Amino acid sequence: MQPNYPHPLLAREGWPFIGGSFVLALLASWLCGAWSAPLWLIFVFCVQFFRDPPRQIPGGDKSVLSPADGRIVAIEPVRDPWLDRDALKISVFMNVFNVHSNRSPMDGDVVQRWYHPGKFVNADLDKASLENERNALHVRTAGGQDITCVQVAGLIARRILCYVEAGAKLTRGQRYGFIRFGSRVDLYLPTDVRVKVAIGEKVSATSTILAELP
């Protein structure tokens, strides 16, 4: 478990939504009684959406951890569009019921960060990786392996948050970003990794090992 985890239970990105929905629901209860039920449902949704529990960190230095909660929707050899290299892409799709904190899959240095504006098509579709709004990090491990970690906005998600820049150091499981309301994260890995997950498998940020570096 990470020491001094900065967002116990509820992500700070959600505090305005949680607080605002609670005040509105409370006010509606006082004024309208049972008619306030829809607002209480919105409050409950905000609490579950912005939950942000700390996670155990498994594996060793060569274990590539999941950067997000969700479901594996792609495992395929591709051309990494950010580093212009052959790579293996593993994509994790997050629906609105998943935890939406994004966490570093490896220890490493952030070599470069890119932001690309784009569309907001369904993040479950392959074309979302190339057409949607996205934020990419090039992370280089101590062993010289390059990993590209891409936050991709979705149909409902309209806000990508990333808290690191080029030159930053990341540690395994470190929280580096957040995407509001449904999205995906693409990892571009070296082609010789050993994949540990399968299409359709549900994964958890940090606590699921996606692959092992050679």
Image: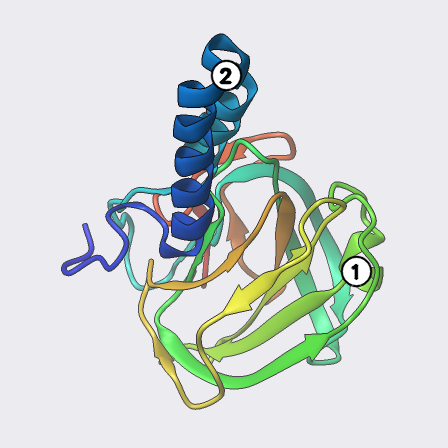
Q: Position of residue 156 (x, y in %)?
A: 71, 44
Q: Is residue 121 left or right of residue 174?
A: right
Q: How is the image coloured?
A: rainbow
Instruction: Tell me the CA gap for discs 2 and 1.
Output: 41 Å
Q: Residue 70 lies in what quarter of the image?
A: top right
Q: Earlier in the sequence, mark 2 or mark 1?
A: 2
Q: Residue 7 lies in what quarter of the image?
A: bottom left
Question: Which residue position is annotated with label 1?
Answer: 132
Residue type at mark 1: give it.
Asn
Q: Position of residue 149 (x, y in %)?
A: 57, 66
Mark 1 surroundings within 10 Å by alpha-carbon count, few (fewer than 14), some (14 through 19), many (20 or more):
many
Mark 2 surroundings within 10 Å by alpha-carbon count, few (fewer than 14), some (14 through 19), many (20 or more):
few
Judged from this view, the residue extending furthest toward the left is: 3
Give the structural element (helix, strand or loop) at label 1: loop
Q: Position of residue 148 (x, y in %)?
A: 59, 70
Camera-nearest residue between 39 and 179: 39
Seen at 40% across and 37% down, the residue is: 23
> Can residue 208 be spotted in the picture?
no
Residue type at mark 2: give it.
Cys
> Which mark identifies residue 32?
2
Q: Is residue 86 left or right of residue 52?
A: right
Camera-nearest residue between 158 and 41: 41
Give the structural element (helix, strand or loop) at label 2: helix
Seen at 27% across and 47% down, the residue is: 58
> Can residue 31 be spotted in the picture?
yes
Q: Is residue 132 left or right of residue 168?
A: right
Q: Is residue 8 left or right of residue 183?
A: left
Judged from this view, the residue extending furthest toward the front is: 31
Seen at 24% across and 59% down, the residue is: 6
> Which mark identifies residue 122?
none
- The quarter of the rendered structure image containing the C terminus is bottom left
Q: Position of residue 42 (x, y in %)?
A: 52, 29
